[in-house]
Amino acid sequence: MASETSIGQAAPAAPSLSRPVPGAPYMGAFLCVVLATVTGELAKSCLDIATITLLYLLPVLVSAARWGRGPSLFASFLGVLTLDFFFVPPVYTFMVRDPKDLAALVVFLLVGLVTGSMATRLRNEAAKSRQREARTLALYGLSRQMASEADLGEIARSFAKTAADTAAGRVTILMPDKEGRGLRQVASYPPRVAALDEKEEAVVQWVLGRGRPAGRGTDTLRDASELIFPAKADRETVAAIAIDLDAKTETLPEEQEQLIEAFANLAAVAIVRIKLAQQAERVQWLAESEKLHRALLNSISHDLRTPLASIMGAVTGLLDKEGAYDCETRDAFLEMIKAGAARLNRFVGNLLDMTRLESDTLRLKKEWCDVQEIVGVALREMEEVLREHTVRVDVPASLPLVEVDFALVEHVFINLLENAAKYSPAGSEIAIEVRAGRDALRATVADCGPSIPEYEREHVFEKFYRLAYARGMDGTGLGLSICRGIVEAHGGAIWLDRSGGPGNRFVFSLPLPQVAEGAWGEEA
């Protein structure tokens, strides 16, 4: 939404176009007749009177096509008189001896009048066609520009400039403020800085309320200094268009007025479109918030309460003085407390990491790290979770060091291992494989669980997304989304490998410093 701008001094009026010299078209018609007369005098020895008569049709056609009806009629009458005076016997007089010549002159005059009228009509139609084409192109260009814009301020500025060029005056777009009690200027071309006075504000409010033009040159509130148009869409007036005309222009011509009304309707449709898009965005945001709210409630009810219940039960048993627990039982209680605390720690860590990723406050503490060490720490952290699985680790000792945030990359391995353990059957194998390529380190965590369906592979890295067959399992659907955020923050990528075979292969890459080809390990 464009911010409210101050309303300013009127810019200087657009310079007026140069006006044609009065009488110039008639002077042009006169010169054309003179030229036809001279041509006829020079060629009368080899031309008959009928051919010379046709010469005088040329000034009529030229005058009609170039200057309109009046000069063409003038050329017709002047041509008849000149033809009679110079070429019809007796010459150099306006008398006509032969009745046939008189009839020929009358027919010439009629033909000249009809031809001039038809040529003038064609000229006017051509001019109207050019005007319609120009209006259509202007509407098309403005509609394309408005369709491509998603910002109200840009749309308003485009409309103001186009309308100002059409009306040859300053155009200001005004809308009700958020409270609906005042007005705010959205755009103005040329810019203005002088505030609207009370009378002008009253006219604008009247137009916004009634949806009809008012102000200068209209039948309503005509004492106002500006002409105000409504911008309406679906019977709703969404804005007012204030046009400050030149002091010599009382009102707009009808064609310009119709064009500006069409512009205003286009702008209104674009404004409504933006408002609907903003409402849809708010609805989507509310839906996402509701989704997050439900996910957090589900997490609190299960992922928090379940480990808390096991911790509280174990602590209660340990504090029971009357219970005779041997060392093995007490150790089991302590292991239960440790596992529950670790689970709570991972869950809270996921929530905090997602919050930092969403708010763009995640800061990487990069250092040169050994990938073997990162994998080893992650495996020790997940030892209890992976105790029912066989873990195969293939991390060559020759791998180069990588400049990463140790704790965050460890968190990526932990989330992938936890995900693999959760969805793989007990006793199955989980494989970790790391390879170095020319410019990236590629790590793979593979499991033997059910293969993720093709239609769900594009969504597994989205927040809160749960697979269809995992609806009843623990988790909030944040782990893979956090992995993607951490890897992309390092400049890498993460994906689900589509190669054949059972299970799932999650692969992520981390950038390596540029070195000579073949200096490190195997090709990825």
Image (spheres, helix red, strand yellow):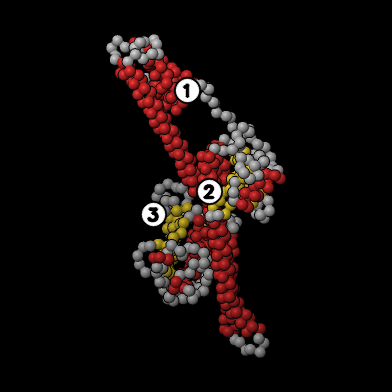
Amino acid type indicated by mark 3: Glu
Taking the spot 68% from the left edge, 51% from the top edge, the residue there is 182
Discs 2, 1 touching: Cβ within 8 Å: no
Q: Which residue is mark 3?
A: 523
Q: Secondary structure at mark 1?
A: helix
Taking the spot 45% from the left edge, 24% from the top edge, the residue there is 71
> Could you tell me which quadrant the C terminus lies in?
bottom left
Q: In this rendering, would 83 be left or right of 194?
A: left
Question: Is label 2 or label 1 in front?
Answer: 1
Amino acid type indicated by mark 2: Asn
Disc sitting over residue 25 in the figure: 1
- Residue 114, located in which quarter of the rendered image? top left
Q: Which residue is mark 2?
A: 265
Residue in the foreground of this view, choosing between 180 and 414: 180
Q: Residues within 10 Å of mark 1 (few under 14, many from 20)?
A: many
Q: Residue 232: x and y, percent?
A: 56, 51
Taking the spot 65% from the left edge, 44% from the top edge, the residue there is 221
Work out how far the residue at label 3 is from the one at label 1, CA to CA, in angstroms.
Answer: 85 Å
Q: Residues within 10 Å of mark 3 (few under 14, many from 20)?
A: some
Amino acid type indicated by mark 1: Pro
Q: Secondary structure at mark 2?
A: helix
Q: Secondary structure at mark 3?
A: loop
Determine if residue 59 is in view.
yes
Number of callouts: 3
